[in-house]
Amino acid sequence: MQLHLVLLLLSGLLAGNAAAQTGVGGGSGSAYRPQLAFTRAEKLKRGINASQWFAQVYDKRGYTPEHFQSWTTSEDIALIKSMGFDHVRLSVNPQPMFDEHEPNKIPADYLRSVDAAVKMILDHGLAVVIALHPDSDFKARLAKDDEFVERFADFWRALAAHYSTLNLDADRVFFEILNEPEFSDRYRWLGVQMKLAAAIRQGAPEHTIIAAGARWSDDDELVFQEPLHDANVIYNFHFYEPHIFTHQGANWSVYSWHWLRGLKYPSSPESAEQAAALVPDEVERLRVIRYGHEHWDAARIESEMHQSAEWARRRGVPLVCNEFGVYRKAAKAEEQILLQQFRQEARPLKLAAE
């Protein structure tokens, strides 16, 4: 998502009881070791997103070696390490290297650029999450085309096998199935995610997989899920609540957001009324006014996050939040309040998001 994140990406582990995973198999080719995902999740306590490097590339050079070599450098990764981060979430758009007719044949020259980025991150003592981040048109096909899902599974199997055979440290290389799925049918996403996870596991028996909910990786979508039949999985959610505040001024997704300016956090009826006056559509204006009465504050943030934490605790699975933030057009003072409250509320839940 095109958000200005103060720390760009923050990931935190939710501690839980791995022994509660009884009955959940290890997946094809994977030993049943429930504690392994928890142990590896300890390496994902504080991370940063490597944005617009291999996904969402707006550089006029496009997806080229010149862009890959200059957009993020070894000096940048060294700086990330020096700031106390422990991992990089490397968003990778599969489309430039996805041949629909032969999805299991990934262009070697393109893959070398991704390999170089992965190695650079690992060489600086950081873990790396390889998160597939296609455009919306690609995800729309996954939501309705079964054969396209099969082809994408073949691609994932080949990609996972490639990194499995490079003899990289499996404790520090993670595979995130899909950044922010765009599935309105939650049941379909359950099946698609299961299919893709099985393909990854066939290609990489020892690596840890990261899974998410059906729509935009939202927390309320996560709690609909049940764990995959694979013990070596970490679960993930993104947190951009309250969206109407964090996305004010944005020119994507909900059209009326681009009208919003000056909406405050914590919410209050007075500030919402003032901001609503800028919105010409009466239906959208009402939504802004409602925000003012919805008591968005630290207690509400804690309550929202608690549901995800409880979902993971009851199922005995590790949980991370690997995106949260506020779009840059929100008021800076309120942005800082919200992000600080998120971090404060994460601590008692053992979501380490410093």
Image (spheres, helix red, strand yellow):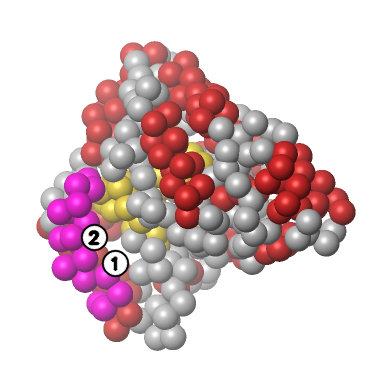
Kind of residue indicated by mark 1? Val
- Work out how far the residue at label 2 is from the one at label 1, CA to CA, in angstroms: 6 Å
Left or right? Give the position of 174 relative to 300. Answer: left
Kind of residue indicated by mark 2? Val
Name the secondary structure under disc 1: helix
* Vertical relation: 247 (above or below) 209: below
In the rendered structure, find residue 114 and report the number of the disc placed on it: 1
Please name whichever residue, 177 or 219, is drawn nearer the observer in this view of the structure.
219
Q: Is residue 83 magenta?
A: yes
Badge 1 density bin: few <14, some 14–19, many ≥20, Cα 10 Å? some
In the rendered structure, find residue 129 and report the number of the disc placed on it: none
Please name whichever residue, 125 or 48, is drawn nearer the observer in this view of the structure.
48
* Vertical relation: 233 (above or below) 285: above
Left or right? Give the position of 39 relative to 181. Answer: left
**Which residue is found at the position 36% from the left and 69% from the top?**
53
Q: Which residues are magenta?
A: 68-86
**Which residue is found at the position 24% from the left and 60% from the top?**
118
In this orientation, does residue 225 appear? no
In this orientation, does residue 185 appear? yes
**Which residue is found at the position 63% from the left and 39% from the top?**
267
Q: Name the spot of residue 240 as percent of width and height, x first.
A: 54, 45
**Which residue is found at the position 26% from the left and 78% from the top?**
70
In the rendered structure, find residue 118 and report the number of the disc placed on it: 2
How many labels, in total?
2
Q: Name the spot of residue 271 as percent of width and height, x first.
A: 68, 46
Q: Name the spot of residue 194 as percent of width and height, x first.
A: 51, 39
Badge 2 density bin: few <14, some 14–19, many ≥20, Cα 10 Å? many
* Vertical relation: 29 (above or below) 87: above
Q: Are the residues tagged 2 and 1 within 8 Å (C-beta)? A: yes
